[in-house]
Amino acid sequence: MEALKGVRILDMTHVQAGPTCSQLLAWMGADVIKFENPQGDATRGQLRDVPDADSLYFTMLNCNKRSITVNMKTAEGKTVFVDLVKKCDILMENFGPGVLDRFGFSWEKIHEINPRIVMGSIKGFGSSGPYADFKAYENVAQAMGGAMSTTGVPDGPPFVTGAQIGDTGTGLHLAIGLLAALNQANRTGQGQYVEVAMMDGVMNLCRVKFRDHQRLTRGDMPEYSVPTYMGMGEVPRAGNDSGGGQLGNAIHCKPHGANDWLYVVVQEAVWSALAKRIGPEIGMPDLATDPHFHSIGERRKNQQLMWTLINKFAEKYTKREFMAILNPLDVPCGPIMSTEDLARDEHVRGREMWVELDHPQRGKWWNVGMPIKLSASPARIERSPLLGEHTEEVLKEVLGYDDARVTALKSAGAFSTPPKKAA
């Protein structure tokens, strides 16, 4: 049995943060009804690579869902919405502040309609505080949540991360909150409102930087390759430093292309074996006992030189060859994997993290797989829905509407955009 079988979700979210959350829950067996206006989720047409087909932006975030189109600007559309709220366990939305309220559906009204329902909301900055009405996007959240100020090279500009920690990271936080609230609702019979702000989610993912922020009030941080000192205030950008108790950095390998790098962590326990292996090849046979590197404290003080020596050794090897040398020495390391590397990787394919699907509009395409592996209920990944594909199915199966009522609602414009008036 699927883990969330029997859980029904009314998903009003769009773009990335909310759909990330609902797709994960759908992969775990929830019946996710994607509730779209007649124009559909905006990402269906954004960055389109196949003419007249849903974009990869949409398809990669909306698998295993059913799509229903409803015009909430009509009385009939609002009636359908109310009936669905009564039948669902979770309602999700990521509209701007006050949008649902203007339709007449505040959280208090939703709770009145279905006291058991859990309502999840994603906001840029939450529903309280001086930033509540600000608009947020992925990179804005990274900027304001602390990620950008601590990402990049020391003397360069701040950088955003390639990982979508503002949108997708917030979706993951919401999934945890919804499942916790649903568990409580099942015990008490009462739902609740679950809110996750993108800025808050990014701050949570930057927790170790706030650790370092407080350490700087008491002293320097010797694991950083850039100068730090007590009272400096903000945590600096430090390139590819590990930022942890062990020294780590990216080493450039043959043939020295954009992604020909191996990330290497030099733990205390592995230094001797590592030094004995690389020392003779770089003309330093006594590297393991060199006083500049003999202790972790000395390696921290002289880490720029240590990385230079390791880079010198790596010049003759590809990232995979260097990894093959380090693995038997128990040195933690991993190649910088490009998107092309990952799309072709045997390990990734074997764990079903790169999955081929078929779509009626775009044909064969690939999606990132389910990262959460449940032994008794493995995910079955299905394609994303076409706009409004399941409207009649949901109306009849979930709400019990008969053909006559569906026809009457269609005629009243409950599921479509009203025709434009002639000029």
Image (cartoon, rainbow, N blue to C red):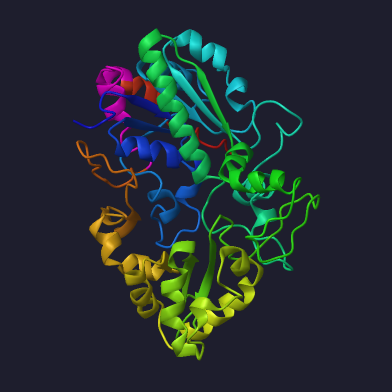
Residue closer to the observer: 137 or 304 = 304
Residue closer to the observer: 279 or 63 = 279
In the picture, which quadrant includes the N terminus? top left
Query: Quick check: 180 above or below 348?
Result: above
Query: Who's the residue at 32% across and 22% down the image?
Result: 406
Give yes or no for residue 402 being in the magenta stretch.
yes
Taking the view exactly as shown, the residue that stands out farthest to the right is: 231
Q: Position of residue 26 (x, y in %)?
A: 33, 36
**Residue 214: in sight, yes or no?**
yes
**Residue 267: in sight, yes or no?**
no
Q: Which residues are magenta?
A: 387-405
Instruction: Please identify the quarter of the rendering in which residue 337 is found.
Output: bottom left
Query: Who's the residue at 53% across and 65% down the image?
Result: 248
In this rendering, position of residue 148 left or right of residue 77:
right
In this rendering, position of residue 308 left or right of residue 278:
right
Residue closer to the observer: 393 or 403 = 393
Give yes or no for residue 44 being in the magenta stretch.
no
Q: Position of residue 128 (x, y in %)?
A: 69, 25
Query: Who's the residue at 37% across and 39% down the image?
Result: 24
